[in-house]
Structure formats: C-alpha cells, structure tokens
Amino acid sequence: MKISARNQLKGRIVGVAKGQTTAHVRIDIGGGVVVTASITNEAVDDLGLQTGDEAYAIIKASDVMVAK
Amino acid sequence: MKISARNQLKGRIVGVAKGQTTAHVRIDIGGGVVVTASITNEAVDDLGLQTGDEAYAIIKASDVMVAK
Amino acid sequence: MKISARNQLKGRIVGVAKGQTTAHVRIDIGGGVVVTASITNEAVDDLGLQTGDEAYAIIKASDVMVAK
Amino acid sequence: MKISARNQLKGRIVGVAKGQTTAHVRIDIGGGVVVTASITNEAVDDLGLQTGDEAYAIIKASDVMVAK
Amino acid sequence: MKISARNQLKGRIVGVAKGQTTAHVRIDIGGGVVVTASITNEAVDDLGLQTGDEAYAIIKASDVMVAK
Amino acid sequence: MKISARNQLKGRIVGVAKGQTTAHVRIDIGGGVVVTASITNEAVDDLGLQTGDEAYAIIKASDVMVAK
C-alpha cells in the first residue's frame, strides 16, 4: 500500500512518551534532525512503536509551511 | 519571533511551482531528502521564495504521522 | 508498512479532477457516502490514481471534528 | 449554519474517552466503520457529547490522504 | 448543528478568488484583521460564498500554533 | 524569520493549561475573541508561554474553514 503524502522521512525512533490519550514519538531522521509526531496512544500500541524501531515520519504537503 | 511548531527543518529551496492559487515549494533538507510544502501563491510572493534560498520547512507535531 | 492514522476508509475512486497543482479525488466508501480528498497532482500521478481503483481515504484523528 | 468542510459523515457516538486536555470520540458511521476524532475536552463538554448521540464526523478535504 | 472546533471567528467576506480546484476566501473579522481560508471551489459554490456575506472562519484548536 | 502561514493574529495569552503531553493556550486577540491553540507541553516550555505574554496565533490558510 502506497500513500499520497508527499513527505515520508525515514529514521529511527528515539523516544515514545505516552500521555493519557496523546503520545509524542520522536524520530531521528539523520543529520542531527529529530522529528516529533503527536499521535494517539492507540496508534502507538497498534503499531507497537518502541525506541530503536525503524520508522517513517509521514507528512502531507498541505501541512508543511515555509519560513525564510 | 519563535514559533511553537516542533519541527523546523533547515534546507535550501530547489523548486517553486505556482498554480492559480496554490504553490508547491520543494526544500532539500540534506541527506537526499526533499520536503514538499503546499502553500498559497501569496505566501510565495510575500516571502519572495526562490530556488536557491535558504529556508525552513515548518511542521506542527500534530500533523506528523508515523509509519512502520 | 502500517501507518498511525486511525481512520483508513476503504472505497472506490469515483472521480479525479486535477487543477494546476492540486487535485480532488473522490472516494465512494459505501452507504452512499463519498469522501473528497484534496492532494497534490504529483501524488495522483505517483500512485496512478484513476476512477474505478480501489483506494483508502486516510485521515489522522486530530483532523476530525465532531458536530451534533 | 453550513460549513465548507466537504466531508460530513453521519453516525452515532460509540465511545468518549477524556484525557487531561484531549479527548477521543469514536463515531460509528455504518458499514462496520468507526471514525476516531481527537478533540479538546472543552469541545466534548460544550457539545455534551455522549455515547449513543447522533453526530457527524467533519473533515476538511485538504486533511484527507489517499492510499492505494 | 454545533461543531467541536474551538475557534469560530465571525466576520464578513472581503474577497473570493477561485483557482482551478482551490479557492481563497478572505474574511474580515474586525480590528483590522483579515483571515484567509483555502477551501475547495465546490465549497464556495455549495455555500454560495460572496464578497459582503457574513461568515465565520472555523479553525480546530490543534491547527493553531503560537509564536512569541 | 518570516513564516508562510497567512494568518498571524496578535494578542495576549489569557490561559495556559498543560495536560500530560498536550497543552491548551488561549490567546485574546481583541474584540472579545479568544483563540484556543492545542500545542505540545514542550512548546509551552520552550517558548516560556505564560498568561499575560504578548503572542501570536499562527494558522495556515489550508486549516481554515468557512461557515455561513
């Protein structure tokens, strides 16, 4: 299955912090850059996300802004 | 001015394509990764975005998904 | 590959309309419900989306509102 | 009042789980499909959302991706 | 019908610009502030949005960032 | 640094409520209008957001809907 989201950044999970409903997953995509994703606890459990896993940060193009 | 968005990826613009209302800006963030942003034409003009410019791709954590 | 997005609605594409940069893809998810997705033309080409294809509408939980 | 969001999926609430600030509301839209919405606790209280209520899942077209 | 989105800013439409698929609607919410919405052409037609109309800019709390 | 987001509403913070991972920041933008932002706790700490601070609510045009 392929998804339309234009941005699929490969990396490795370096942190998973669960709150009561919302979790923060941090993915090291290389070059010293860590991307933070705010997703549901259910998604963390469903995918079995753990520190050390290879994973992708997926971002729809319309959710990316530009700063200069 | 500092913005709350957790993800601020530094790179260089490698493409600006304007449609009638919506533009696609492509930013090379290094390591062979190019991020695509879909923003308004007005924003492209307002910031004077051009190929070759240093720029940041800015993404709110709640707009990042994880795939594994 | 599995994605964290909580909402993955299976259906069939009933329309693809491309603009200059942005396309609208309509997916019939059954029960008389058609979901509209606004994505980049590049994504339409990359996935080869065409009327009649089986496809999923993918929506992050934080992008869903509730009305009553 | 009518809203511009292209996707307004009618269903019935089958679960409301509140965290400290963010709640997850699950809406059964028929055909065995349950949509999850991540909204503020304040919204849950303000609309008085409860299991069993008829409700709509509202989603902007630009927040829908396509997978194939 | 009431929607969960926390931000519902009342104003008056001061501009509607349609592209091939995506339109920009500008709403003056008072105090010299104009909010720009990027929505589908279909939504513009469906709601009959025109300059001079009273309208609301509707924004989900999870789509608002803070800068300081 | 300038950001592409079309909507940058100046105001004053009137409330900061932190949950376990997600915080709600309320910004009074004048004219009796308070905008709610749902952001990460980390962002609140990083920017040192406190009641009474001058701040901006930043919203991408593609995240604004219109109701009439």
Image (spheres, coloured by chain):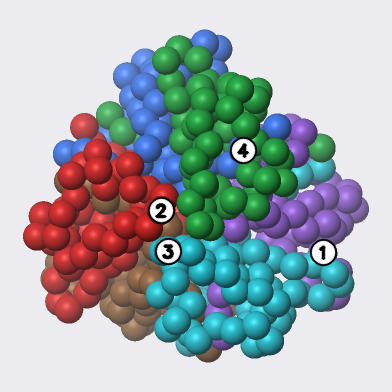
Chain colours: A red, B brown, C blue, D green, E purple, F cyan
Residue type at numbered disc 1: Asp
Residue B68 location, x and y as percent? 17, 46
Whole-number angstrom distance, CA of label 2 to CA of label 3: 7 Å
Tell me the element at label 2.
loop
Task: Tell me the crowding category of disc 4: few under 14, some 14 to 19, or many 20 or more residues within 10 angstroms, Cα based.
Answer: many
Residue B5 in which image quadrant: bottom left
Residue type at numbered disc 3: Gln
Whole-number angstrom distance, CA of label 4 to CA of label 3: 23 Å
Whole-number angstrom distance, CA of label 4 to CA of label 2: 20 Å
Residue C64 location, x and y as percent? 53, 41
Whole-number angstrom distance, CA of label 3 to CA of label 1: 36 Å
Q: Which residue is mark 1?
A: E28
Tell me the element at label 1.
strand
**Left or right of E32, for residue A20:** left
Q: Nearer the viewer, residue A30 or B34?
A: A30
Tell me the element at label 4.
strand
Q: Nearer the viewer, mark 2 or mark 1?
A: 2
